[in-house]
Amino acid sequence: MIKNIIFDIGRVLIGFEWNDYVNSLFDEETAERVTAAMWGTGYWKELDRAILTDEEIVERFYSAGPDVKEEIWEAFSRVGECVTRRDWAIPVIDDLKARGYRVLYLSNFSDHVMSSNREALDFVSHMDGGIFSCDVNVIKPAADIYLKLIEKYDLKPEECIFIDDHKDNIAMARKCGMKGIVFRDRDQFEADLGQALAKDSGHDRISVVCYGDSNTYGYEPATGGRYAPEIRWTTILQEKLGDHYEVIPEGLNGRTTAYDRPGAGWKNGITSFVSCLGTHKPVDYLVIMLGTNDVAGGLGLTDEAIAKGMENLVVLAEEKSPELQGYIPEIIVAVPAAINCRWADDSPEYAEVRRMMKQSRDIEPLYRSIADRHLIRFASGVDAEVNLHDWTHLTEEGHRQMADIIYDVLMKEPASYDVEQKLVP
């Protein structure tokens, strides 16, 4: 259940349109050079990190724009004009607090900007606390700043929802176990937050929806039936996670990522995906493990086409989840167990089997790239043990291995991004 609502500040609770600000001070060419020196280099983030002095930061600005030193100093010294107050911030905060939520802030913010226009930050006194990056010398999206907030206020991450205007900051919040809403404008933010709080009512367990094929269903090739519940990886995962979680298996025999199978178009993973998300909302974690039937279903798909099918599902989850539940779940892209025929030799009769074996492994780096692009989690089950009967379905041991793989990814400590590569604040 959501109990804590955490806000970023810049471009969320205040306006901070630095590009418009610089353009208001100088002609277009000068504004471009000043912007490149101050915000295009990454040095502004050092101001938020507050390890160097303001003077040292300004010298770095100068080094990046030696021909516009005077203009850089003017823009820096007058930066308070860039900060604009949003009249709706205090009413929104007060309303949330009146409804019983704790309201905190977590913001990359410098003392220089803060002192330049304190009136615009008058809402801070209405909040229950928070962390400015300049006070802890760490900036988002580094995991440490989130963990410092969690520790300082004794937060349970699953009880928190974080609002920020940057997707990578939201992604790290999700990796730390929080829910997240990307802020675009007030109307969108209030609609998404309202939806999240409404759907959260009575949601007292962390839901893990496992969207997959026959290996998520628990198909047993020796009998053509289904493994007993206690053998399936989803059940084992539930036991490992405990009662605070709810693992929801959504396995369909023959399901592909996003392609019709001859005579069975309903096994196209796209067709039932959104309805599945709607059925189980709110979804906290979404594990998508598909691809085996794309490889082995006689569809003639390339590695890239299979990966595109997986990415289509990820994009659909990102696009549709906010309207369903107010926020995007933490998505895990999972590579299924590789097809493995132990006696496939170099003879022509096994040529197609060898192709499937190779392709079921070759999609692994492509799936990993999808996870990297979307700032989501990745799991690889390629080495999980498959059955001798058909080379594709998990053995009992394979189910145990898959449960361990997904559990480890769910429990993985949040990793930090290389924040130096994030050049624009």
Image (cartoon, rainbow, N blue to C red):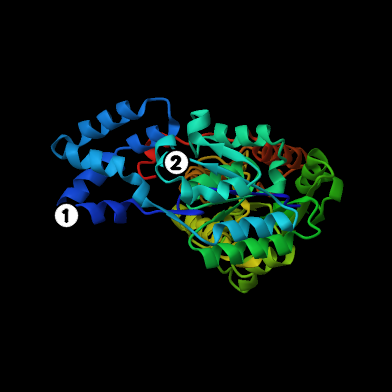
Q: Is residue 238 above or below residue 302?
A: above
How packed mark 2 is, by other alpha carbons closer than 10 Å (few <14, some 14-19, many 20 or more), is: some
Q: Is residue 264 above or below residue 375?
A: below
Residue 27's label in the rendered image is 1
Residue 195's label in the rendered image is none
How packed mark 1 is, by other alpha carbons closer than 10 Å (few <14, some 14-19, many 20 or more), is: few
Report the number of numbered marks: 2
Q: Is residue 192 above or below residue 123?
A: below
Instruction: Residue at 48%, 36% (x, y): give it.
Output: 417
Residue 401 in view, yes or no: yes
Q: Which of labels 2 and 1 is toward the front?
A: 2
Label 2 sits on a secondary structure element that is: helix
Place of residue 240 in the rendered image (x, y in percent of width and height, measured from the top left): 79, 38
Q: Please state which amino acid type lies under the numbered disc 1.
A: Asp
List the residue tagged with mark 2. Answer: 114
Instruction: Residue at 18%, 55% (x, y): give it.
Output: 28
Res. 277 image quadrant: bottom right
Label 1 sits on a secondary structure element that is: loop
